[in-house]
Image (cartoon, rainbow, N blue to C red):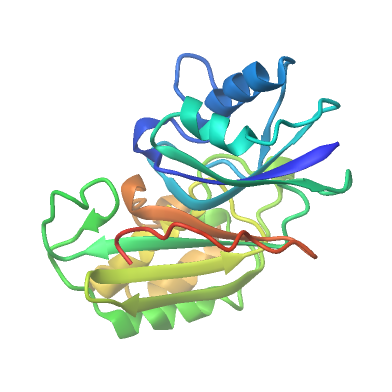
Amino acid sequence: MRYFLELAYSGSAFGGWQKQEEVSSVQALLESKLSLILREPTEIYGCGRTDTGVHASYFVAHFDTLVELPENLIYRLNGMISKSIIIYNCRPVSDEMHARFSAVSRTYRYFITHTKNPFLSDMAYFLPHKPNLDLMNQAAEMLLSHIEYRCFCKGKAPGDSYKCTIMEAVWSETSAGLVFTVTANRFLRSMVRSMVGTLLKVGLGKMSMQQFTELLHSGNRNLAGKSAPAQGLFLVDVVYPGFEKSAVLILPPVV
């Protein structure tokens, strides 16, 4: 039987979702606790790989088991795992559903504050200068008509494919600062942080629209802006065909 876990986590205490040697990860922690509860080795597969320090207010992972799940599974899991993680729900799905490969879209939000705030230091990027929002949205709109995003990818992409379909890319202003929202069918490694850093470069007058256009067609990561810090980035949504999210979700406190 296959199950989907819906969860959220603060990435500040972890080296990302993906398990790795000598680094604390969300995946490794969940696998160890779930294996204890089910009394069998249990592997968990996530909807993506968030980097060190990146957060998720909504994340989906799946696991397979022949064991009948205890009714209090969610309660027990939440009591055993880090306070930086919360399990929303655990639901059975068809064997064809895969947390990563069945997702049709993912949405990230990047949060920027213009006011120094010690309570947001791990959840937003402090930028004292206000960039030009209109210029950044003009540049962001260009992303919707582009196809290949090698210029925003750190390292080599899986399968050597740098093509993504971006459905939404927009900056908005809130009482707390700025929010960049981007939705796509897939994302490359460090792609969102690289886009944010480059768009900020445009907004701060350090890159012209012509240079931004040339960057998109160049495929050269060295021409892009510096990646924005990890703490401002949240995975906020993952969409699957025929799968409805849990009704109770925790939003980032910087919204």
Q: How many marks?
A: 0
Question: Image quarter for residue 202?
Answer: bottom left
Residue 56 image offset from top left, x and y in percent: 47, 49
Residue 124 image offset from top left, x and y in percent: 27, 55
* Residue occupying image coordinates x 49% and y 80%: 141
Out of 48 and 132, give the one closest to the viewer.
48
Residue extending farthest front: 71
Out of 140 and 224, give the one closest to the viewer.
140
Residue 155 image offset from top left, x and y in percent: 54, 39
| Quadrant assignment for the C terminus | bottom left
Query: Looking at the image, can residue 47 be seen?
Result: no
Q: Is residue 146 left or right of residue 224?
A: right
Out of 60 and 112, give the one closest to the viewer.
60
| Quadrant assignment for the N terminus | top right
Above or below, comparing residue 233 to residue 2 in the picture: below
Q: Is residue 186 left or right of residue 93?
A: left
Q: Is residue 193 left or right of residue 120?
A: right
Above or below, comparing residue 92 to residue 197 in the picture: above
* Residue occupying image coordinates x 58% and y 63%: 247
* Residue occupying image coordinates x 49% and y 25%: 80
Residue 40 image offset from top left, x and y in percent: 74, 15
